Amino acid sequence: MSSGQTVLRATALVKRYRRTLAVAGVDLSVDPGERVGLLGPNGAGKTTTLMMLLGVVRPDEGVVEIAGHTLPAERSRAMAHVGFAAGYLPLPERLRVREFLTLFAKLYGLAHPGPAVEEALDRFGIAHLAANMGNELSSGQRTLVGIVKATLHRPRLLILDEPTASLDPDVAHKVRAGLARICAEDDTALLVTSHNMTEVERLCQRVVFLSGGRVVADGSPDEVAAFFGRDDLEGVFLHLAETEGERAR
C-alpha cells in the first residue's frame, strides 16, 4: 500500500428508500495504489453504496470525500479525479474505437489526446481494435474499451463495476495485469465490484463485504475467508447470500 492522502473516504453512509434501510452506516476508505473489492450479494446495499460514492445518489446521512473534495458540494472537482466503467454501459455504434477514446481524452481535458489514446490501447493490448466500429465489437470487447476509456486521464480513483464480466479468460488476465500496473505505476486507487470471486481474489489486495446494508468484513481475501470459517471468497459470498435470502423472507 502506498503512503499519502486517502483517495476515497466514506463515513457513516446511510440511505433509506421509503421503509427500506438500504445502507445502514457504511464506512469505507481506499488509499493510493490500493486495489479493493466491494462485495456482497443482491440486496446487501452494494449498488446503492456505489451510486453514493459516484455522487449519483445523495446519502441521507454521512459524508463522501474523493481526493479531498466532498460530495455533493464539490462533485465536479471530485469526479475530475475519477474513472468509471461498467460492462452495462453502451458504446457509440457508429464511432471507431480510436475516435471514441480520442473524444473522451478531449473531454477529460488532456493536452495530448493522441499519444494518451495510443498508450492506453497498448497498455491493455487492444491496439488491433482501434479501427473497429462500435457495432463490430463483441460484448467483451465493448467492456474492455470502456475500461480503457476510464483510464485515459490517469484518474486518482478508478471505480469498476463487474470489470471482467463477459471477458474471455485470456482477456480478463490482460485486464487484471493492466489494472495492477496502473495502480503500481500511477498510485491509482482501484475499487471493484464483482460477483466473480475468483477474479476478485486475483486482482484485489483487500475486500469489503456488505450484508444488510452494513460492512460485515474488511481485510485481505484470506483474512475475510478465515473470519467466516470458509475456504475462499466464494464460500463467504454464498454464506452471505443465504443470510440475505433469510432476511428477505
Image (spheres, rainbow, N blue to C red):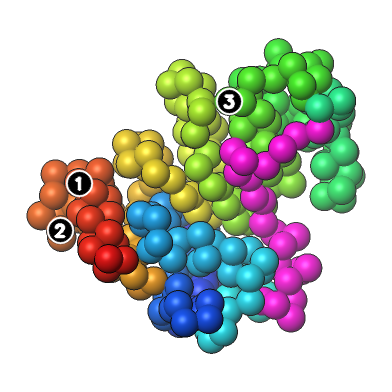
Residue type at mark 1?
Answer: Gly
Q: Which element carries disc 3, helix, strand or loop?
A: helix
Q: Is residue 133 left or right of residue 48?
A: right
Q: Is residue 21 above or below residue 166?
A: below
Q: Mark 2 or mark 3, which has the lower sequence index?
A: 3
Given contact means CB atoms under 8 Å apart, are the residues at marks 1 and 2 in contact?
yes
Label 2: few (<14), some or many (≥20) within 10 Å?
some
Q: Which element carries disc 2, helix, strand or loop?
A: loop
Q: What residue is disc 2 on?
A: 228
Whole-Å distance between the Cαs marked 1 and 2?
Answer: 9 Å
Q: Is residue 164 above or below residue 4?
A: above
Q: What residue is disc 1 on?
A: 235
Whole-Å distance between the Cαs marked 2 and 3?
Answer: 33 Å
Label 1: few (<14), some or many (≥20) within 10 Å?
some
Q: Which mark is residue 169?
A: none
- What residue is at 45 percent from the left and 61 percent from the top? 46
Residue type at mark 3?
Answer: Gly
Q: Quadrant of the N terminus?
A: bottom left
Residue 37 coordinates in the image, percent (x, y)? 41, 52
Q: Which mark is residue 140?
A: 3
- What residue is at 62 percent from the left and 41 percent from the top? 88
Residue 218 coordinates in the image, percent (x, y)? 30, 63
Which portion, as a residue range, is magenta?
A: 71-92
Judge whether residue 84 is colored magenta.
yes
Q: Which element carries disc 1, helix, strand or loop?
A: helix
Residue 80 coordinates in the image, percent (x, y)? 75, 60
Residue at the outermost front position: 249
For residue 178, say whether it is visible. Answer: yes
Residue toward you, 210 or 4: 210
Q: Is residue 106 left or right of residue 226?
A: right
